[in-house]
Amino acid sequence: MAYLETAEAVEIQGHGEEDEGRAVAVVLLGVLLVLAAWAAAVVTWGLPGLYIPAVALVPVCMLTIVRITLG
C-alpha cells in the first residue's frame, strides 16, 4: 500500500467520526429542546403541564418496550 493510499484511507475514516459527532449533537439538541418545552409547560400551566405530557408518552414507552422485547 502506497503512502497516498494510506492517507486517503485515514481521511475517509475521519469523515465518519465527524458525521457521528454531528448525529449525537443533533440528538442531544432534540432532547434539550423537548425538556425546555416541558419546563415551559410546567411554568405556564403548573402541575398539569408536568404530568399530562408524561401520561401522553406512556403509549410511546410501552411500544418501545414491546419492540425491544421482540427484537
Image (tube, rainbow, N blue to C red):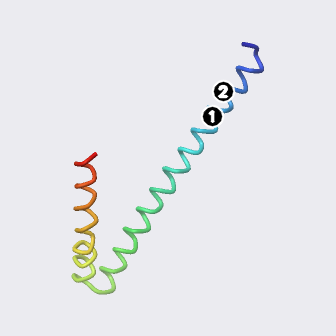
Report helix, strand or loop for mark 1.
helix
| Residue 56 x/y as whole percent | 26, 75
Along the line of sight, which residue is nearer the eye, 33 or 54? Answer: 54
Residue type pointed to by label 1: Gly
Q: In this view, does 67 lie above or below 52?
A: above
Q: Name the residue under label 2.
A: 10
Q: In this view, does 20 lie above or below 30?
A: above
Q: Name the residue under label 1.
A: 14
Horizontally, residue 11 falls left or right of residue 42, namely right
Q: Residue furthest bottom?
A: 45
| Residue 58 x/y as whole percent | 22, 68
Horizontally, residue 47 falls left or right of residue 4, namely left
- Which disc number belongs to residue 35? none
Q: Which residue is drawn at 53% across and 44% down?
A: 20
| Residue 24 x/y as whole percent | 48, 50
Quadrant location, the C terminus: top left
Instruction: Choose top left, top right, bottom left or bottom right for residue 14.
Output: top right
Mark 2 and mark 1 in contact? Answer it, CB < 8 Å: yes
Q: Residue at x 48, y 60 (%)?
A: 29
Report helix, strand or loop for mark 2.
helix
| Residue 53 x/y as whole percent | 28, 75
